[in-house]
C-alpha cells in the first residue's frame, strides 16, 4: 500500500497534497480511491488543481463536495455520495472541453438567488452556459454507499434515461415530483447539458439510445476524437427534435458521455444549432 501511495504522490502531487490536507481524510470518497492509481479522474483532478482552478473563480463548492465523507447514516451517506459524484463530473466535463475539444472554461457561475448553470465555456462560436450532470450521481441503494458490494444505481431499462432527461416523474426515494433534466437546465439558462450515463458502452448502445430518446433524429457525422491525455472518443453527432413537454428556447445541445471501458463514447444531440460539431470542424 505504501508503494502505491508513493507512486500516487509522484503521478498526482497536487491531488495527493489536497487529500493529505483533508480533515478525517481516511473517511472520504477520494481517499478510498487512492489505491487505484489508474482511476481516470486523478489526471482530470490534477489538471484542475494545476492549471485552471485559479482562473475559474470560486471553486470552494466543488472542492467541498469532492472532500465529502460518508456519515454513518445511510440516507446522509447517499446524499454526500451524490454531491461527490456531481462535483466529480463537473471537473471531468471541464477536462473534456479543454483537453479533448480545444475549448476553454471561463468561470464557474456564481450562485445567486435563482438556480444557475455550473460554468461558462468559450468555443469558436461564442460563450455558452453549461450544466454537467452524472446520472450515476442520482443513484441510491439500501446499503451504506461505502459498504462492500453496495446496491448501486444500475439502470437496465432504456426508458429510465428518457424519463430522467425528458419526462416528469415521481422520485422512488421521497415520493416527490422530479423535473426532467432538460426543463431544469432550461430554467437555469443552460445552452449545453452534458450528461454522464452508463447506457452507451458500445456504438450500438449509443445509436439505439439516441433513437429511444429522440425518435426524430438524423445522424450528421461520426468521428474519432484523439487526445494525448486519455482514451480516444467515438463521437456521433445527430440533429434531433427534443421530446420535451415544454418548448425549449435556450437549451441547444445535450452531450451523452460514456467514460468507462477502453474507448469513450459521446453522443451529441443538437436542436437547430450544432455547436460542438461546428467547433471541432474549425479546430481541425
Image (cartoon, helix red, strand yellow):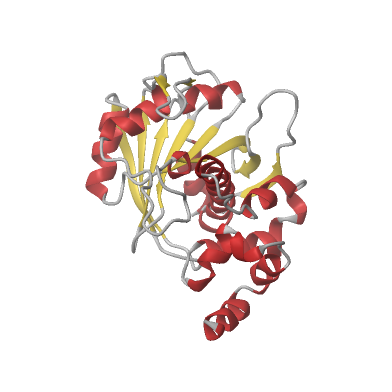
Residue 278, can we see it? no
Q: Is residue 208 left or right of residue 12?
A: left
Q: Measured from the top left, where is residue 281 in percent x and y? A: 47, 47
Q: Measured from the top left, where is residue 86 in percent x and y? A: 55, 44
Looking at the picture, tell me which residue is in the foreground, 181 or 28.
28
Residue at 53% from the left image edge and 43% from the top image edge: 82
Q: Compared to 100, does 35 lie above or below?
A: below
Residue 231, can we see it? yes
Residue at 48% from the left image edge and 20% from the top image edge: 176
Q: Measured from the top left, where is residue 60 in percent x and y? A: 74, 48
Residue at 46% from the left image edge and 38% from the top image edge: 138
Q: Compared to 236, does 174 lie above or below?
A: above
Q: Is residue 49 left or right of residue 3?
A: right
Residue that extends furthest to the front in the rendered view of this protein? 72
Residue that extends furthest to the top in the rendered view of this protein? 246
Q: Is residue 130 left or right of residue 260?
A: right
Looking at the picture, tell me which residue is in the foreground, 6 or 241.
6
The number of numbered badges drawn on the structure is 0
Q: Measured from the top left, where is residue 73 in percent x and y? A: 54, 45
Q: Quadrant of residue 52?
A: bottom right
Looking at the picture, tell me which residue is in the foreground, 141 or 88.
141
Amino acid at each position: 500500500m505504501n508503494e502505491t501511495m508513493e507512486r500516487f504522490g509522484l503521478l498526482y502531487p497536487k491531488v495527493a497534497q489536497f487529500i493529505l490536507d483533508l480533515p478525517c481524510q481516511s473517511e472520504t470518497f477520494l481517499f478510498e480511491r487512492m489505491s487505484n492509481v489508474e482511476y481516470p479522474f486523478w489526471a482530470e483532478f490534477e489538471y484542475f488543481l494545476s492549471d485552471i482552478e485559479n482562473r475559474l473563480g470560486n471553486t470552494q463548492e466543488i472542492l467541498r463536495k469532492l472532500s465529502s465523507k460518508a456519515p454513518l447514516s445511510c440516507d446522509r451517506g447517499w446524499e454526500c455520495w451524490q454531491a461527490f459524484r456531481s462535483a466529480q463530473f463537473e471537473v471531468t466535463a471541464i477536462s473534456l472541453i479543454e483537453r479533448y475539444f480545444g475549448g476553454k472554461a471561463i468561470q464557474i457561475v456564481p450562485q445567486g438567488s435563482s438556480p444557475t448553470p455550473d460554468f461558462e465555456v468559450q468555443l469558436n462560436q461564442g460563450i455558452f452556459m453549461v450544466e454537467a450532470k452524472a446520472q450515476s450521481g442520482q443513484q441510491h441503494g439500501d446499503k451504506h454507499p461505502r459498504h462492500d458490494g453496495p446496491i448501486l444505481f444500475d439502470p437496465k431499462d432504456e426508458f429510465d434515461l428518457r424519463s430522467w432527461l425528458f419526462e416528469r416523474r415521481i422520485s422512488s426515494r421521497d415520493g416527490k415530483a422530479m423535473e426532467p433534466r432538460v426543463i431544469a437546465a432550461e430554467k437555469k439558462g443552460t445552452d449545453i447539458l452534458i450528461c454522464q450515463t452508463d447506457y452507451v458502452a458500445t456504438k450500438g448502445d449509443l445509436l439505439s439510445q439516441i433513437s429511444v430518446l429522440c425518435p426524430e433524429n438524423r445522424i450528421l457525422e461520426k468521428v474519432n476524437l484523439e487526445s494525448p491525455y486519455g482514451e480516444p472518443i467515438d463521437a456521433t453527432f445527430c440533429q434531433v427534435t427534443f421530446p420535451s413537454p415544454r418548448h425549449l428556447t435556450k437549451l441547444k445541445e445535450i452531450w451523452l458521455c460514456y467514460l468507462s471501458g477502453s474507448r469513450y463514447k459521446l453522443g451529441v444531440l443538437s436542436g437547430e444549432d450544432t455547436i460542438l460539431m461546428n467547433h471541432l470542424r474549425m479546430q481541425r
